[in-house]
Image (cartoon, rainbow, N blue to C red):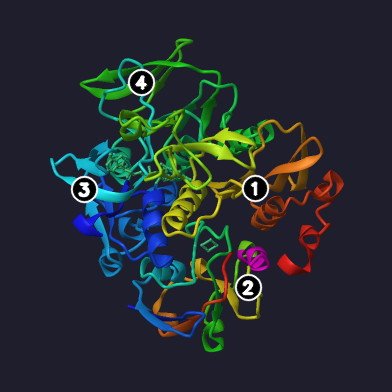
Amino acid sequence: MGDGAGVVIVGGGQAGYQTAESLRQLGFPGAITVIAAEDFPPYQRPPLSKAYLLGEVDRHRLKFRTEEYYAEHGIDLRLGAEATAIDRAGKRLLLADGTSLAYSHLVLATGARVRLLPIPGAELAGVHYLRSLADVEAIERRLGEVAAVAVIGAGFIGLEFAAVARKLGKPVTVLEAAPRVMARVVAPELSAFFDETHRAHGVDIHCDTAVVEIAGRDGQAAEVVCADGHRVAAGLVVVGIGVIPETGLADACGLTCDDGIVVDGHGSTDDPAIFAAGDCTSYHHPFAGRRIRLESVQNAADQGRTVAAAIAGQARVYDTVPWFWSDQYDVKLQMVGLSAGCEKVVVRGDRAGGKFSLFHYREGVLRAVDSVNRPADHILARKLLAAGISPTPEQAADADFKLKDLLGAASA
Amino acid sequence: MPKVTYIEFDGTERPVELPAGWSLMQGATLNGVDGIEGECGGSCGCATCHVYVDEAFLDKLDPPSETEEEMLDCTSSPREANSRLSCQIKADPRIDGIIVRLPETQS
Ligand SMILES: Cc1cc2nc3c(=O)[nH]c(=O)nc-3n(C[C@H](O)[C@H](O)[C@H](O)COP(=O)(O)OP(=O)(O)OC[C@H]3O[C@@H](n4cnc5c(N)ncnc54)[C@H](O)[C@@H]3O)c2cc1C
Ligand code: FES
């Protein structure tokens, strides 16, 4: 491969790392270079809003692999390097240091960036976002110094952080513009359960509440001001109001982008030499039956594997049923499928005791299962949905009915 | 540092020294031992870190939690009496020298 042209991957997150690893696992012999803007080797983000702040994992354990792994597998991992433009005609990637790299295949795994809070005071010290290791280290330093915490946005990351801050003994107020927590991503029944759980742990939750300003004192965040005049004192404000797919490089070189870089079932963009994977992509998902963009480890890892397979000449279509998890206090939530648009929900297990699953049906067919502290239901539901097997609502509601039996001898 | 020997499905032995407190799943994935996935990051939610623990060490481990029990019923390779989830086993001096065998598949 003259001129060092091989696979060049932009982004050293979940998807970028997985693409590189899978290429080697599949026996891809060519050069692999990963251009990774962060200074730290590829690492897992989920613990950042969970175990990390509780001191249960240190930074070294966040890494997918040790640094030696990359060298040993011929993966040129360039930390702290940033890609600035793509020259499609010349098949070169331009870097911020003025150099450029030739590619045979380019993989965009640029992830997403946090949505910034568009209100006065958002730039004050003490207002933080939570996406990277650097973000969470800054939050950790601040957390030790403040009396109270406010969380803006009751999505997964905001609520996970709220749970951690409560465990560390801080008073926590959560402010959410929507009428219920996690409204964008979960069914109302689940929002209600998490609302109760957080209140039981002493979190002060305000839904239907717009935030209009962060008032400061000496350049430091001091109070969050709500539209109804309510003021919440907080020296640390953690903002979790969603992310925006990082499509800048793709957009600038004319690749189709629409709420993400548009790719097909092999992760290919409309340029056959350029692929994309992870939070930055949007694609027609066979299970969803429409174009979607997911923000999850499952999606980033599986798309990374899919892209690697395509480049290694072993193409297969990405059609995994989406799954996701979240840990808050002792509650382990695991979701599989897509519950949006379902009209019937059946409870399996003990809702009052906090060990249950919600089975979501659309037109009589199982479409999604949300499990709360019932991990075995989740694993079985993944298998059922993948196989297109739908237990009847009566079977789902009967906790004594063995879902495993529906899978047949081969896969059970 | 406690020593752990992973025996991959093809018989390859992979000795690794783990800092105390690390889980056997973390030790395997960070060091590139083939055959442990750990896709849930060690929160006992995926059963892709299944191992067969050498009988001599089985009694030295704390018994599985209720959640681990349930998850052990969902492993891809058959559950045996010595099946455990490696994310739930923490390296400590009591289990120095532990040997675990990896199953054929995790997912
Ligand atoms: C706090 C937190 C908790 C989460 N918890 C869960 C969870 O419990 N379960 C779950 O399924 N998902 C969770 N997620 C989501 C999951 O982590 C993401 O979906 C996943 O990381 C996406 O991977 P990615 O590789 O697409 O993007 P990212 O992980 O964002 O990686 C993209 C990388 O590309 C780099 N980059 C971007 N542009 C350039 C450039 N031009 N040059 C060089 N480098 C560049 C970025 O710096 C970044 O490091 C969580 C996310 C966060 C932030
Ligand atoms: S890593 Fe998921 S159960 Fe052990």
Mark 3 vs mark 4: which is more N-terminal?
3
Which tag is nearer the camera, tag 1 or tag 2?
2
Which tag is nearer the camera, tag 3 or tag 4?
3
Residue type, label 3:
Leu
Q: Which mark is residue A223?
A: 4
**Residue carrying label 3:** A101
The chain letter for the residue carrying disc 1 is A
Q: Are marks 1 and 2 in contact (CB under 8 Å)?
A: no
Most distant residue in the bottom direction = B56
Q: Residues within 10 Å of mark 4 (few under 14, many from 20)?
A: many
Give how far across and how far down residue A366 sits, in percent. Answer: 75, 43
Disc 3/disc 2 C-alpha distance (Å): 44 Å
Q: Residues within 10 Å of mark 2 (few under 14, many from 20)?
A: some
Mark 1 vs mark 4: which is more N-terminal?
4
Which tag is nearer the camera, tag 3 or tag 2?
3
Visible residue check, residue A120: yes
Q: Which residues are magenta?
A: B68-75
Give SS at disc 3: strand
Quadrant occupied by the C terminus of chain A: bottom right
Give the quadrant of residue A290: top right
Q: Which mark is residue B77?
A: 2
In the rendered view, tell whether residue B6 sits above or below residue A256: below
Nearer-the-camera pick, A363 or A392: A363
Give SS at disc 2: loop
Residue type, label 4:
Glu
The chain letter for the residue carrying disc 4 is A
Disc 3/disc 1 C-alpha distance (Å): 47 Å
The chain letter for the residue carrying disc 3 is A
**Residue carrying label 1:** A372
